Image (cartoon, rainbow, N blue to C red):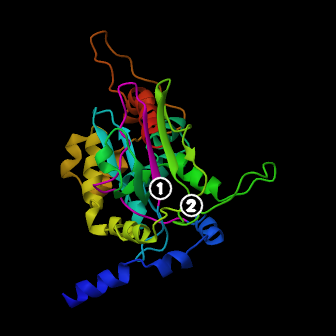
Amino acid sequence: LFNYVKRKINMSFTLADIKKAKGGLESISAAMAKPTYARDDEGFFKLERDKAGNGAAVIRFLPKPKEDELPWITYYSHGFKGPSGRWYIEKSLTTLGKEDPVAEDNKRLWASGIEANKNIAKAHKRQQKWISNILVVSNPANPALEGKVMPFQYGKFVFDMLVEATKSDDLDPDKVAFNPFCPLTGANFKLRIRQDDQWPSYDKSGFSAPSALSDDEAKMVEILNQMTPLKDHIAPEKFKSYETLAKKFAETMGLETARTESVESMINSIGTAAPASKPAPAPAKSADAPEPAKSVAAAVVAEMEDDIESYFKGLGNE
């Protein structure tokens, strides 16, 4: 009990902590250029959309919890549909600096120099996401969440807007650079999603004028003490093992029989295309002879080209 109480005291924000952190533009701007790592988890704030694909909310990005180094963390994942008809949507072990079966296969495919293999590697590339603590200021689709502090997962488009907020503009003297995570000098973020043709777009999102998180200092302290440590999302034991991911990868690629093979042989057999050298003349075949099976590479390119582009436009680029 003593250790628990001690931990809560060390995590708690005080008014002195808030005033000490005022501004912080230079440090937060420098930190945005450095990569950090995390994983996906449950309980994130999600912007709900209507039948037309539109949604809106107002959120406030919060500073880093005391147990973290930055007010955000980031992780990588892969998401694609294989020739088996199954989707492979898994967090990448490269997030933890470890070998990942999809990442390894992408390297091999790219190094082959074969265009079909390169197309597969592009379709299987990893996607990057960020996680921060936010205050839900306004959420018309679900007002019950208003006033709650929640982790929020977002993509490069939103992260770039956070970066842009920290920069001044010589051509626009009215633009004021600020730290979007600061509780005193930050700003509310108008999160907007709309359906642009067939893809969701966040281009109508943006910051309001800088203002304090709350006019009530005690309320501000209360809000910040609801934050959860971002590093809790970086639990290596919560990632699937290399062997488990390799089997799932093989099955997604239609190699069901590879379940009994070694991990190495499974990975070596995925996405193999014919060498670039001149092929030998094909033997004559009778009219009744069956057509040869398509290579895995050809099957993936033919079946996945449209699906994977659609998936990543909607999932990885907000």
Spot the residue most to the bottom: 2
Kind of residue indicated by mark 1 = Arg
Q: Earlier in the sequence, mark 2 or mark 1?
A: 1
- Left of 8 or right of it: where is 1? left
Q: Considering the numbered disc 2 on the image, is that residue within a helix, a strand or a loop?
A: loop
- Which residue has dot 2 on it? 186
101 in relation to 125, above or below? below
| Residue 294, picture quadrant | top left
- In depth, the one of 303 and 171 nearer the eye is 171
Percent x, y for residue 203? Answer: 56, 37
> Magenta span: helix, strand or loop, mainly?
loop
Question: Would residue 318 be visible to someone looking at this image?
Answer: no
**Magenta run includes residue 187:** no
- Left of 172 or right of it: where is 88? left
* Residue drawn at x 18%, y 51% as measured from the top left: 260
In the rendered structure, are the residues bearing label 2 and label 1 in contact, judged by CB atoms less than 8 Å apart?
Answer: yes
* Residue drawn at x 31%, y 9% as measured from the top left: 287
Percent x, y for residue 97? Answer: 43, 67
Tag shown at residue 127: none
**Magenta run includes residue 42:** yes
| Residue 83, picture quadrant | top left
Range of magenta residues: 35-61
- Left of 263 or right of it: where is 67? right
- Which residue has dot 1 on it? 60
Spot the residue most to the front: 216
115 in relation to 165, above or below? above
Crowding around mark 1 (Cα neighbors within 10 Å: few <14, some 14 to 19, many 20+) is many
Percent x, y for residue 9? Answer: 33, 84
Q: Quadrant of the N terminus?
A: bottom left
Question: Would residue 54 be visible to someone looking at this image?
Answer: yes
* Residue drawn at x 39%, y 51% as measured from the top left: 102
